[in-house]
Image (spheres, grey):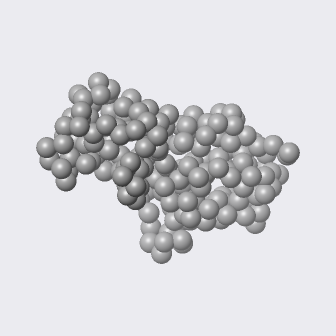
Amino acid sequence: MIVVYTPDDGSEPEQYDARSLLVAEASALQRVIDQKWAQVKANLYDEDLDAMRGIVWVLKKRVSHGLAFGDFNPGVDAMVTRMDRREVEEYVTDVVTTVRSANPEVTGELLAHALREVPDAAADAEHARRLIEEATADGGKDEPPSGNEAAESAAGEPSPTPTSSAPDTSTSASSPTSSTSHPELSTA
C-alpha cells in the first residue's frame, strides 16, 4: 500500500510505500500509534489517519532523524492510500478469475466496467489500465493473464511474485482499496 502525502506548502505529492518499512521502523510505528502491524496494514485500506500518518512519519525519519511523531501533524485531507503495483495485479487477477469462474460467458467489456475505478485507486494508474486491458480482452476468456505476466510485458521485466493472499470475493460495490470488496458487475 502506498500512502500519498500532499504537503500544505504546495509542493509535489510524496509517495511512501508501506512495504518498504524495516522491522525496527514497523516496531516504532506500532508503539507510537498503539496498533499491531497487521492492524496497521488492514487500516491502511480504510485510510485510517493514524496508520497513514505513522507510515509517512516513520519513513520521513529516514531523512529527518529527529522528527518526532507529534511534530508531523498533516491535515486530515493531506493523505490518501493507493494500491501498489502488486496489489493491483492481485486485485485485478482475483476479480477476473472469480467473475469468470462464476460466469464464463461474462464479456471483457463488463469486466472492464467493473474494474473502472481501479486506476484511480492505484499509485501507478497507467500500469493498472494496461493490466485491466490485458485481463479483460475477450480473447483471453479461458484464462486471464496473471498480474506478473502483464507486468512483465508492460515493463519488460518480471515483477515480484505475489506472496500475500488476494482480497476476499465479496460482490459489494465499494472501493477497490477495500481489502474485502470487489466491484459489482451490472449490465446497466
Where, by quadrant of the figure, is residue 128 drawn? bottom right
Question: Residue 184: in sight, yes or no?
Answer: yes
Which residue is depicted at the point 39% across and 29% down?
39
Q: Nearer the viewer, residue 98 or 5?
A: 5
Q: Nearer the viewer, residue 120 or 98?
A: 120
Tell me, yes or no, if residue 17 can be seen here.
no
Answer left or right for 134 relative to 15: right
Residue 92 rendering spot, x and y as whole percentages: 61, 52
Name the residue: 67% across, 63% down: 133
Farthest residue to the front: give it. Answer: 9
Residue 47 on image: x %, y %: 47, 36
Rendered position, 126 above or below 88: below
Q: Image point 72% across, 48% down: which residue?
A: 114
Above or below residue 188? Residue 144 is below
Residue 156 % position (x, y): 48, 75
x and y percentages locating residue 23 in the rendered image: 22, 41
